[in-house]
Image: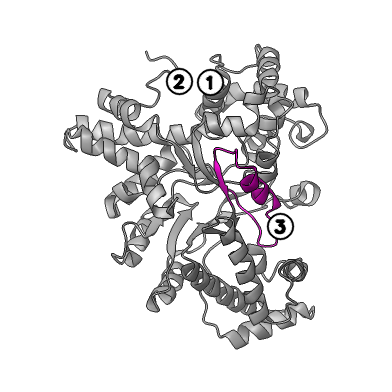
């Protein structure tokens, strides 16, 4: 029987072990999509205790705790930090076979050298010892990034953000991790959001442009994109239910926008026309800037209306959605490609039924201009676990080129999430190593090891020109 989380965790064969330890383990990390707070990096924050760095804002853990019968006061409520941690420690033994069990103990091991499994029996000791470490200089957030060899971290930022913290990081000059902003303009696409007009007004104020028309909106977005680019930004990201690709004209988009700014109601069809127009215009802009566009598709958000009303969004009440994805994606990408204005693109799906769909869709628009121009993104959110990652890589292998894949990202708000890259790398090496030993792949360790390193790091470095 193997020991839990030993050096060959998830590695079932000697070849898998060799691929991981000799080729993958020590590669730096390019985390090209996350939600880390840049102010905490700029200020090199020390967290007071393990709860603050581990449980604040972590809706994965909150969902597990709620499922274990833990009252909301221990998740988002007013219980003390230790009381919240104690309830998490009570929940952890019940998370067996959930990826949280693996992630929890990987993080305890890799950051804190803590090798006991967390339970109520040792909760107080682990809380006290880890919290004491977190208050030391080496456990400030920059030290945590350096410890995990994070070379690049791309945060997610609204176009109206000042990016003052990114500027401070650049001016500091001592941060070993390159921290770059990512352009996330969804607020200015989703015209049916009740707060849309307020968002547009704020964007205009920041861009110093009075937005009364569609052309002025696009001008403001371009102004902010240029500002992002001046600070090293080279990626955009969208979190949408599905791609919007209705027929439109600039005139129709302008008329619809002006109706909303005048506080008039619009139909669902009108909203779709406007969304399609703006999304296409942004795609053209990304190509012009030489950026990469990312699309996270298929999340059914804020399902619990009572929780949304009392706790707000992004508190753990989301699930996999079942929208049709193929037709909109094909039309959107094809419309851009028709005029040679299709930027490098990464597509992430949340519904595993769509894996093969996505893997074949990217092949429609990989035009030979570069390797892997259109990417099927790594398993995301509910799929960033062993089964989800294997399914994504198997679909990509069967219908595309796994060797050109740009690998893993955390998509996380936590500075303790970077062992997820190790988790991914072990799963990748196990897939390849097992097939070598089964005779399904040649025993060419030098080439397969190079492929592993490319997927873990080199492909992303070349793709984004970091």
- Mark toward the viewer: 3 or 1: 3
Label 3's element? loop
Say which quarter of the image contains residue 153: top right
Classify the position of the N terminus by image quarter. top left
Residue at which label 1 appears = 109
Label 2's element? loop
154 horizontally vs 141: left or right: left
Whether 185 is drawn above or below 88: the answer is: below
- Mark toward the viewer: 1 or 2: 1
Colour approach in the figure: one colour
Q: Is residue 449 visible?
A: yes
Residue 91 in the image: state x and y as whole percent. Answer: 64, 25
- Mark toward the viewer: 2 or 3: 3
Name the mark on residue 162: 3
434 horizontally vs 118: left or right: left
| Residue stretch rendered in magenta on the structure | 154-180
Residue 332 in the image: state x and y as whole percent. Answer: 46, 72
Q: Which of these two is toward me, 38 or 401?
A: 38
Residue at which label 2 appears = 5
Q: Tell me the residue at 63%/26% (across/down).
A: 139
Q: Residue furthest right?
A: 78
Using the numbered discs, state the Cα–Cα distance from disc 2 to disc 3 in whole angstroms. Answer: 43 Å
Whether 241 is drawn above or below 143: the answer is: below
103 horizontally vs 372: left or right: right
- Sequence-wise, the earlier of marks 1 and 2 is 2
- Sequence-wise, the earlier of marks 3 and 1 is 1
- Sequence-wise, the earlier of marks 2 and 3 is 2
371 horizontally vs 230: left or right: left
Q: Tell me the residue at 71%/38% (across/down).
A: 43
Neighbour class for label 2 at 10 Å: few (<14), some, many (≥20)? few
């Amino acid at each position: 029987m193997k020991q839990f989380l030993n050096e060959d965790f998830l590695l079932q064969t000697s070849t898998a072990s060799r691929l991981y330890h000799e080729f993958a383990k020590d590669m730096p990390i390019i985390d090209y999509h996350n939600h880390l707070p840049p102010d905490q990096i700029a200020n090199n924050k020390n967290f007071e205790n393990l709860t603050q760095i581990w449980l604040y804002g972590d809706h994965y853990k909150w969902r597990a705790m709620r499922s274990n019968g833990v009252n909301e006061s221990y998740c988002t409520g007013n219980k003390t930090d230790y009381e919240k941690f104690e309830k998490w420690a009570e929940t952890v033994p019940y998370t067996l076979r959930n990826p949280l069990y693996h992630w929890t103990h990987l993080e305890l091991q890799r950051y804190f050298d803590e090798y006991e499994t967390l339970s109520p029996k040792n909760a107080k000791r682990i809380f006290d010892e880890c919290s004491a470490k977190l208050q030391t200089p080496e456990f400030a957030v920059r030290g945590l990034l350096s410890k995990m060899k994070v070379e690049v971290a791309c945060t997610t930022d609204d176009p109206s953000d000042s990016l003052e913290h990114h500027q401070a990081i650049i001016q500091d000059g001592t941060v070993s991790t390159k921290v770059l902003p990512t352009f996330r303009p969804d607020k200015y696409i989703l015209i049916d959001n009740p707060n849309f007009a307020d968002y547009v007004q704020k964007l205009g104020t920041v861009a110093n442009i009075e937005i009364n028309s569609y052309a002025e909106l696009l001008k403001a977005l371009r102004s902010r994109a240029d500002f992002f680019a001046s600070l090293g930004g080279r990626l955009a990201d969208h979190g949408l239910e599905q791609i919007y690709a209705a027929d439109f004209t600039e005139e129709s988009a302008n008329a619809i926008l002006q109706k909303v700014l005048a506080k008039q109601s619009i139909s669902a069809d009108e909203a779709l026309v406007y969304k399609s127009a703006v999304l296409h215009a942004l795609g053209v802009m990304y190509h012009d800037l030489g950026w990469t566009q990312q699309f996270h598709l298929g999340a059914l958000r804020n399902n619990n209306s009572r929780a949304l009303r009392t706790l707000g969004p992004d508190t753990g009440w989301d699930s996999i959605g079942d929208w049709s994805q193929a037709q909109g994606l094909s039309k959107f990408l094809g419309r851009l490609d028709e005029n040679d204005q299709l930027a490098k693109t990464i597509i992430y799906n949340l519904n595993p039924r769509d894996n093969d769909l996505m893997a074949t869709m990217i092949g429609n628009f990989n035009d030979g201009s570069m390797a892997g121009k259109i990417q099927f993104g790594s398993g995301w959110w509910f799929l960033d676990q062993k089964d989800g990652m294997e399914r994504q890589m198997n679909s990509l292998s069967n219908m595309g080129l796994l060797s050109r894949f740009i690998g893993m990202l955390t998509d996380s708000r936590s500075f303790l999430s970077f062992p997820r890259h190790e988790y991914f790398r072990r799963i990748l090496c196990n897939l390849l190593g097992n097939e070598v030993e089964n005779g399904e792949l040649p025993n060419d360790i030098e080439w397969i090891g190079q492929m592993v390193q490319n997927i873990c790091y080199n492909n992303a470095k070349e793709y984004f020109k970091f």
